[in-house]
Amino acid sequence: MVNAVESKITEGINSALTSVINSREEYYENNPLPSVSDVKGLISSCSYKNAAISGGAGLIPGPLGMAAAVPEIIAIIRNQMAMVADIAKAHGKTASNELILDVLFGASGNVATGLVVVHGQKILVKRAGARVIQKIVAMLGGKITQQLAKSMVAKWLPVAGAAAMAAWSKISTDKIGKKADFIFSKQIEYETTSDDLAKISDGVAQIQLAADDLKSAYQDLTQGTSIIKTKIQILINLMKIDGKIDDSEVAHLQNLIENSLLSNEDQMQLIEQIGSKEKVAVDYSVFKENFDESLALVLDMIALANIDGNFHVTEKMFIKNVAKMIGFDDNDLNELLENNTK
């Protein structure tokens, strides 16, 4: 099911890439160009538009909910691409396929396409052939699908799933807009290469992208179970923080444990930790500099704090302390708390 979702999202990105650029060019042939002073408004408008789109998505728990939300996800991505093109125009520039993909691909983390290099006040863009563009589109589709699947809550709590979708779209759109503003505020130069050199460059780029794929897959394999276990341990500590453990909280954590990919030994340990009065020792380092996992953790904590209908002040302080330890942005956290607390 997840593979089918990824395939549909990738197809949607591919379709949107050319059509969005062309449609924005046609729009500005008959309408005034935005200015640099309009950029903040462009980002804000697109962020709230995308949050509204995603507000009704993800109401079905699990992969079926994510599959049903594919049209909304593609609409969000299309809006983000249009926003990047508009920000480019505000800076007197035109957004190319390479730049749009690089901005979308790298906005939520340190991974980038390798097509854009920042040299001080200058941006060097490597022209990419069709095969490289298709590879990047496929990787972007996979990356977005993984982002949406990160949160355990989105799998098991329908309302929290909708909140997770809205949070993802709002925060990712903000970050994409800010990165686009940074990129297009600088001088942009494109590498010029002969056809032969372009083919060689494409081959090198594909090798690099394949290597990045393997590295990412290896990291997911080695860190995946560690992150899941650590996340549940953090949620166990959160459940205990207000001095009152509700049956709904225990049932939710047990459900997460039973449906995880953890070993029987790890699952038994977590069940014992739920029943213990002691605080669980946690290594927060697995979440540092990992935006996707950090966002998923924050969403999971907020959802658990809400599950008994009483978001206690000690729970809010706990979430703020954890967010600080993992380096989660204060503004993003405050917005999530404001929009997702009862």
Image (cartoon, rainbow, N blue to C red):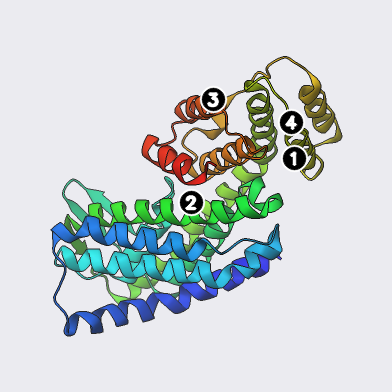
Circle 2 residue: 167
State which tag comes first along the sequence, 3 or 1: 1
Q: Nearer the viewer, mark 4 or mark 3?
A: 4
Mark 2 residue crowding within 10 angstroms, few (<14) / some (14–19) / many (20+):
many
Q: CA distance from mark 4 to mark 3?
A: 17 Å
User: Where does the N terminus fall, quadrant-wise?
Assistant: bottom right
Identity, as a three-letter code, of the amino acid under mark 4: Asp
Q: Of marks 2 and 4, which one's residue comes earlier in the chain?
A: 2
Q: Are marks 4 and 3 in contact (CB under 8 Å)?
A: no
Q: Is residue 97 left or right of residue 69?
A: left
- Give the mark nearer the N terminus: 3 vs 2: 2
Cβ–Cβ under 8 Å for marks 2 and 4 = no
- Cα separation, mark 1 vs mark 4, equals 10 Å
Residue occupied by mark 4: 246
Q: Cβ–Cβ below 8 Å for labels 3 and 2? A: no
Q: Secondary structure at mark 3?
A: helix
